[in-house]
Each structure stands twice: as C-alpha cells, then as structure tokens.
C-alpha cells in the first residue's frame, strides 16, 4: 500500500479459549468491496436507468411459491384479458413491445394444448418460447428475464450492434419497470422489498431461488454494493445467508456455528488432555490455600484441621475480586468484617514479605499544556493544569503483624484501617482438595504416553509460516500460520497445541472463508443497533465515546460522524490526522444480545473450535465452570479504529503495551482505505519536524541528553495492504522489557502528550507505545525484540496472555 493511503479497520476480539463450527451457507463470489455512502448524489430513477439488463437464470430445484399459487388461479382469466388488450396495444402504435419479466416460474403442464395457451399469455409478451426439459422426478424450467436475445418487433430489422447505448439504457429501464409492474399487479400488497418493506416508486427484483423475497434497487445499491441485480435474481441475500435487514440482523440461529462434531474417543482424549494441563495449576492453588490455613492456625493458636473458615456471603451473580490488585478471587481470601474490604492470598503473601505492589489506580494526572503544545509548539501559559508533583502520594506502609495477621488497608488505599482481616471461603471446605484427588486418581488409571511432535515448521513449509522476527540464533522467528481449511484436521490441532503451549501467537489465514459473508460494514451494524426493538438501546446509539489517540482522552462524537470519518478520514485544523478508536462497542449489554446475527457469524469464523467456542468449546475452561456461577465475559467485542499506513510517532491509532488476563482471538472483519491529499502529506511532514524539535529541547533540558540519543520520528511504511500491526513479546523477555521502560520512561508521552515521569508498573500502566526506533534501541541494549507482523483482512490471530500492543 502506498504511503499516502491510511487504513482503518474493524477487529472483533474474543477473550478466553473458545470454539466454533459452521457449515458454509452459499458463499458469495469474492469481489472487491468499496465503502458506500448512505446518501446518493443522483436520484433513484437515474441510478436505475443504468441497471444492467438481467440475464437468463436457470433453476433446477423448484419450489411452489406464493407467486405460483397466484398465477395458477388467475392464468385462464388473464389469457382472455391479455388477448383483448393485444388489439388495444396495437391501436396505440407502440414502437416496440415493452417486455415484462415474470417473477415466478411457469408451472409445468403435460397437455400440449395448455402449453400453447401458456406461451400466448401476455405475462411475458416479448419473450421467446423456450424449450423445457421434462423429467419424471423433477421439473427444470428456464426463465427468461430481459436479455439481448429477446425478440422485439420494432427492432427485428436491426442488429444489436446498431443500437445506441442510450437506447439500450432506456430499454433496460423499461424492462425493470415492466418487471415491477408485473410483480405489483399479481402480488398486490405482497410486492414489497424484504430489506426496507417499501414498494412504492421502487424497482423490485424477485429471487428465483426461493421465489418469495423481493429486493428493491436502492437497497441493493446501498446495502449490497458487491451484488449485481443478476446476483439478486439468481439468489437473494437472504438465501445466501447475508441479508442485513433489521429483522435478520436481530435473529439468531439462522446459521450453524459448529463446524465439526467430536466422537466419543475425541471427547475423551480432549478431556484427559485438559485435566493433565490444569492439574499443576490446581495443585499450586491448593498449596497456597493450605499455607494460608496454617497461618490462620497460628493466629488462632490451634491446629490447621481445627480452623473454622466461615463462608463469604455473596450471590452467584456477584464476582468477588481483590480490592488491591483487582484480580478475581476463586475461593479462600481475607475480608474486613467492618468495611468488607477483600484481599486475595497473593497480596497477603506480598504484605507479609514486605514487597506489596502499588495499586493500579495510583496513576498520574498528566498536565494539560494546551492544544498548541500537543501539536509541537510551546505550552500555553494560561492553560489550567494539575502538576504531576502535586499528585505524588507519600509512601503508605501496610505491614502484617508478627503472627501473620493483617489489618484492613489504610484509608488512603480504600480500607478502614481498623479491623483484622478474617479468612473467608467461597466454595465448600474440601471442594478444592477433593477435586485435586479425583484428578490424580483418574490420571493414575491411564498410562499417558509422551506426546508426539506434530510440528513440521522446521521443514520447507513456507505456506504455513510467516516471518515475524530476526533474532540471532533463535528457532522461533517464524510463526505458525495455517489456512482456515487446514485447521479442521486433527493433526493441525495437535500442531497448534505445540506452538500454543510455548506462548507463541498463531495466525490463521482466510478465516472468513468459512462464513456466509455477512456485511461487517460499520454502518450496517450501527443501523441494526438504531433499529433495535428496545427503544432505550436505540436512543443511546446516536453518540459514542471514542478515544482521541493524540491526547489519549475520551471524546463524545456523533455516531454517524465517527463512521463517516472511518470511511473518509478526519483531520485537525492543521491537517494532522485525527485518530479515533472505539473499544468494546457496542458499549451496553452483551454483543450477542444486541447483534445476534453478527455474533453467530463471528463464532462461525473462529478457527480451532475446541479452544475458541465460547459456548461449547471442549478445551475452553470457561465452559466447564459450574452452572449458576458467574462466568467471565469472554465477548465477542468489537474494536473499531482509524489508522494510517505509516507511523506518525505521535497520536498513532494504537493499543499500548499491556497484558490481557486471558488468551484472546482477534479477527480483522473489515477495512477501509483513506487517501491523504498532497497538502495533508506536506503538513504532516512539517508537523513531524516540530515534534522532533520539541523532543530534543525537552530531553536536553531535563536530562541533558545528547542529540544523537533522542528518539527520532521517522516515517515507517509497511508494504502490506490494509491491516493491523502487532508487536507481541515472548514471556521470558518481559523482565528485560520492563527494565528498558523504566530506564527510558521519560522518552514516552501519554495523556495530553505529556511526558511519562513516574512508573508504577511498566506493563499494567499502559502508558507506552514502542515506535520502530524504540524497538531498535531495545534490541541493541537488551538483545530482545517482539514478534512483529501485519494482520490482514480475514485473518484470525490467537494472542496468548503475554505482553503485546497493536495498531491499525
């Protein structure tokens, strides 16, 4: 992609381990899809005049439709009426017979006399008589819909090549009009568009596959730009499984999301694999709980077996989490009897050891120096701000007593500081230990052979590998990247598990080939939300809260304006690209409740179903949680972001360095390209120079850094087409990454483009984005580099719960 093209993208993210399957529902022909505006510059009639002439469609599988019934009942009456009208039409001296295309298929008859009568019907007055094949078991009918082979009396003496384009367009217009009149005359009130439920002043096209549903030309042009009228006549969007009308988008179960069924042997194999994989973590959890019970025994001056642990009063719909580190609590924890402050066992151990980490909420309030400063100029002297020095919190000591007991957190940390924290439980007393014993007994009854290696990446398999790093002496510079059709094989699942167990990301190509092809155009999704039957939900969709990537602040913007910017681009007054992003959209309720059809489509696209299905994945731990227990929200969630093909260095549309709490699957569902003008490209180059000078001046003032040490904001262009750029670090490289960020934190900018002067946790702060120059320095100083790759349209990326960042 050229440097002047900016790329925007819609990514659908699915957290946790999940699985899906789907039978392909009439896949469409792959054609390039261009973004289409909601409003049209020309009138519908002008648009429809240019419609290409519909071609003949042969349908071998016939159904009896509503149109057939209407035609059968009134065919004899129409015969006489049409013969009488013939004479009247001749008197009017029409230059040509205007052809009508029937919207139903002629019912096969056996009697030759009836066949002759049927050919004389004026339902399709300008059609040639066509030969019809007969079969004892089925009937095949060729339906001729306006086509250049049609015999028109006024044109019989002229060849087709002699007709002018304008005359042909007029004839095509007449064909569409005749087809619509024929539909309305015979279907009456039923002749309405399935998409918009309108029929007046619209040209209608009926599907010859189902012979029931009609679509009007404006809806075809606006909502199905990749389909021609011939495609609609052959098989309508509903029959293709891609209809995006309001009714269909709010319907679930229209497609099957499961691709393959597991037999008993496969289920047993997977469940045994899951027990083997989870048992070490279960033992670690049980050991931590046993240690806490022993500590409580010392506090109570009794035996561990005599310790009475009371049950925590919480409902199944309530998620218990640590008030300090915000981690979910599984079972044993400590709670304040006075203020209900709750602490996980890990934080208890940190307090007793004297190395308690800072709270995630203790973040700096960055100074706002005005919009001119954000764009590389001097700070505004009158700008109101909160000094970073004023937000510095004095060190708060929180220590355990000598016997191991812990008092509630100080008021500065959200507690009361008075009562001693009591040991509480969520599950029955022996539930965890019994589960551990059952797992060990089960595995002891089966001899587990050492796993075989199914990895063939070392051999010459360029089609299943993608280079993502250039580490010296490393064997994991290439990532496993199979095609979506290959992942259905059992050996590829085993191959995937080898890479996944090492914490490596996996890229699955052509994931959307397994879907029906539903539109992921943002305007289609927004329209479905606005037309939601729940008025409260619909009213909340007029505006969205997006993130301004330059200032890293939340901004409220009209939803239509946001999506227009997605398709056309947005800029500030100085022509600097305005990068906006929507996270976890739509914001309220679950995605599957608001957009059930899109949810099914996404699940049907997920590869490696055993892991990725959020509903029934056999290797998805979340699906194994007991009924009635509040399960984690695994999505799906939509991420809509603007983007550029080159690195801006400031205000890039990015997700900063972070570590997710669970594994995730991301599929790039839609992209749009925005071309930058020469004027904008020139303005960007000038502003980058201002940013560079501002960086040099501030760094020299604060630390006296030499000029050659200043991070440059060079232009970096990736050769790939539209997509999302990923940087994912290996688990063993995280300590060195954290050390680098602490050392160079002053070189990074965060909210209001202010410099980062304080580090609480290099990763969990989510304040850092590594530019290309930073990644070069990281490799030079610490010898590490991330996997870096571009996710293309239709690709699914499996992201392990490791440190990573992304950008569009």
Image: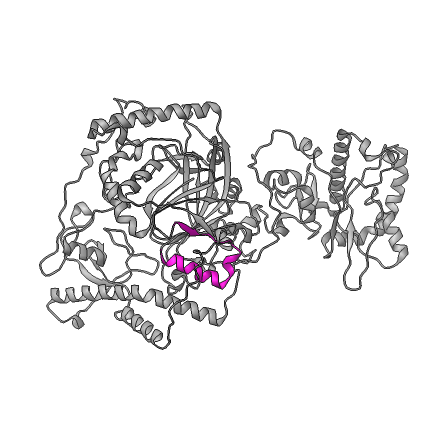
Point out residue 20 in the picture as x, y percentages from the top left corner.
49, 58
Q: Residue at x 75, y 40 (%)?
A: 181
Point out residue 334 in the picture as x, y percentages from the top left corner.
20, 59
Q: Nearer the viewer, residue 211 or 507?
A: 507
Q: Compared to 86, does 275 lie above or below? A: below
Number of marks present in the image shown:
0
Residue that sits furthest to the bottom in the current view: 445
Q: Compared to 229, does 694 lie above or below? A: above
- The answer to which image quadrant residue 54 occupies is top right
Task: Report the span colored magenta.
Answer: 477-502
Point out residue 507 in the picture as x, y percentages from the top left corner.
45, 51
277 left or right of 593?
A: left
703 left or right of 220?
A: left
Point out residue 493 in the picture as x, y percentages from the top left corner.
46, 61
Does the stretch in magenta take in 490?
A: yes
Q: Nearer the viewer, residue 313 or 149?
A: 149
Q: Compared to 175, does 577 lie above or below? A: above
Q: Residue at x 16, y 51 (%)?
A: 355
Q: Point out the image quarter for the C terminus.
A: top left
189 left or right of 773?
A: right
Q: Residue at x 35, y 52 (%)?
A: 801
807 left or right of 98?
A: left
Does the stretch in magenta take in 192?
A: no
């Amino acid at each position: 992609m050229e440097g002047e093209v900016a790329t925007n993208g819609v990514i659908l993210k699915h957290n946790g381990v999940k699985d899906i399957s789907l039978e392909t529902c009439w896949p469409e022909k792959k054609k390039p899809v261009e973004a289409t505006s909601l409003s049209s510059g020309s009138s519908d009639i002008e648009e429809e005049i240019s419609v290409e002439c519909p071609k003949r469609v042969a349908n071998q599988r016939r159904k009896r439709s509503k149109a057939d019934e209407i035609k059968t009942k009134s065919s004899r009456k129409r015969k006489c009426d049409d013969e009488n009208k013939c004479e009247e039409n001749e008197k009017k001296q029409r230059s040509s017979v205007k052809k009508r295309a029937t919207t139903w298929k002629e019912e096969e008859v056996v009697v030759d006399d009836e066949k002759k009568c049927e050919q004389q019907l004026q339902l399709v007055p300008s059609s040639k008589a066509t030969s019809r094949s007969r079969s004892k078991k089925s009937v095949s009918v060729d339906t001729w819909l306006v086509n250049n082979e049609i015999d028109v009396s006024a044109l019989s003496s002229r060849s087709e090549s002699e007709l002018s384009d304008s005359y042909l367009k007029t004839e095509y217009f007449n064909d569409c009009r005749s087809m619509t009149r024929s539909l309305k005359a015979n279907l009456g009130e039923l002749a309405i568009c399935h998409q918009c439920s309108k029929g007046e002043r619209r040209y209608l096209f009926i599907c010859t596959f189902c012979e029931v549903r009609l679509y009007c030309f404006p809806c075809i042009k606006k909502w199905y730009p990749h389909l021609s009228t011939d495609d609609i006549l052959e098989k309508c969007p509903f029959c293709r499984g891609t209809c995006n009308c309001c009714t269909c988008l709010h319907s679930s179960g229209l497609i099957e999301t499961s691709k393959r069924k597991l037999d008993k042997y496969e289920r047993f194999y997977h469940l045994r694999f899951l027990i083997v994989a989870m048992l070490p973590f279960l033992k670690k959890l049980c050991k931590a709980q046993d240690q806490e019970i022993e500590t409580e025994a010392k506090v109570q001056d009794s035996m561990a077996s005599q310790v009475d642990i009371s049950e925590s009063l919480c409902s199944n719909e309530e998620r218990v989490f640590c008030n300090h580190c915000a981690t979910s609590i599984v079972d044993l924890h400590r709670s304040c009897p006075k203020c209900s402050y709750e602490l996980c066992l890990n934080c208890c151990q940190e307090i007793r050891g004297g190395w308690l980490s800072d709270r995630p909420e203790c973040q700096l309030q960055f100074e706002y120096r005005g919009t001119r400063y954000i764009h590389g100029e001097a700070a505004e002297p009158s700008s109101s701000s909160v000094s970073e020095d004023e937000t510095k919190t004095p060190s708060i000591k929180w220590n355990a007593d000598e016997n191991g007991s812990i008092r509630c957190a100080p008021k500065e940390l959200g507690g009361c500081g008075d009562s001693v924290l009591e040991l509480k439980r969520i599950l029955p007393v022996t539930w965890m230990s019994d589960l551990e014993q059952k797992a060990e007994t089960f595995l002891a009854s089966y001899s587990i052979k050492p796993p075989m290696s199914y990895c063939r990446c070392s051999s010459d398999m360029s089609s299943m590998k993608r280079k993502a790093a250039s580490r010296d002496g490393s064997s994991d510079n290439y990532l496993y990247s199979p095609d979506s059709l290959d992942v259905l094989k059992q050996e590829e699942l085993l191959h995937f598990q080898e890479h996944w167990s090492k914490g490596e990301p996996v890229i699955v190509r052509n994931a959307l080939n397994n879907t029906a092809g539903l539109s992921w155009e943002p305007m289609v999704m927004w329209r479905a939300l606005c037309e939601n039957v729940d008025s409260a939900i619909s009213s909340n969709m007029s505006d969205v809260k997006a993130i301004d990537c330059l200032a890293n602040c939340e901004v409220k913007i009209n939803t239509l304006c946001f999506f227009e910017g997605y398709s056309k681009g947005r800029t500030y007054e100085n022509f600097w690209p305005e990068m906006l992003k929507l996270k976890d959209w739509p914001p309220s309720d679950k995605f599957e409740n608001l957009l059930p059809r899109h949810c099914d489509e996404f699940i049907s696209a997920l590869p490696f179903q055993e892991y990725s299905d959020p509903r029934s994945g056999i290797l998805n731990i979340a699906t194994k949680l007991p009924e009635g227990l509040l399960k984690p929200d695994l999505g799906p969630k939509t991420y809509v972001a603007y983007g550029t093909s080159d690195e801006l260095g400031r205000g890039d549309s990015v997700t900063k360095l972070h570590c997710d709490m669970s594994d995730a699957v991301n599929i790039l569902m839609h992209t749009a390209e925005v071309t930058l003008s020469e004027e904008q490209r020139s303005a960007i180059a000038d502003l980058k120079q201002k940013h560079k000078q501002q960086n040099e001046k501030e760094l020299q003032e604060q630390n006296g850094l030499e000029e050659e040490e200043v991070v440059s904001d060079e232009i970096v262009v990736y050769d790939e087409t539209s997509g999302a750029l990923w940087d994912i670090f290996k688990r063993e490289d995280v300590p060195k990454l954290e050390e680098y960020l602490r050392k160079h934190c002053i070189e990074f900018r965060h909210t209001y483009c202010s410099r980062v002067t304080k580090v609480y946790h290099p990763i969990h702060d989510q304040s850092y984005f590594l530019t290309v120059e930073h990644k070069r320095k990281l490799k030079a100083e610490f010898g590490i580099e991330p996997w870096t790759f571009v996710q293309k349209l239709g690709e699914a990326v499996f992201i392990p719960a490791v440190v990573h960042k992304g950008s569009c």
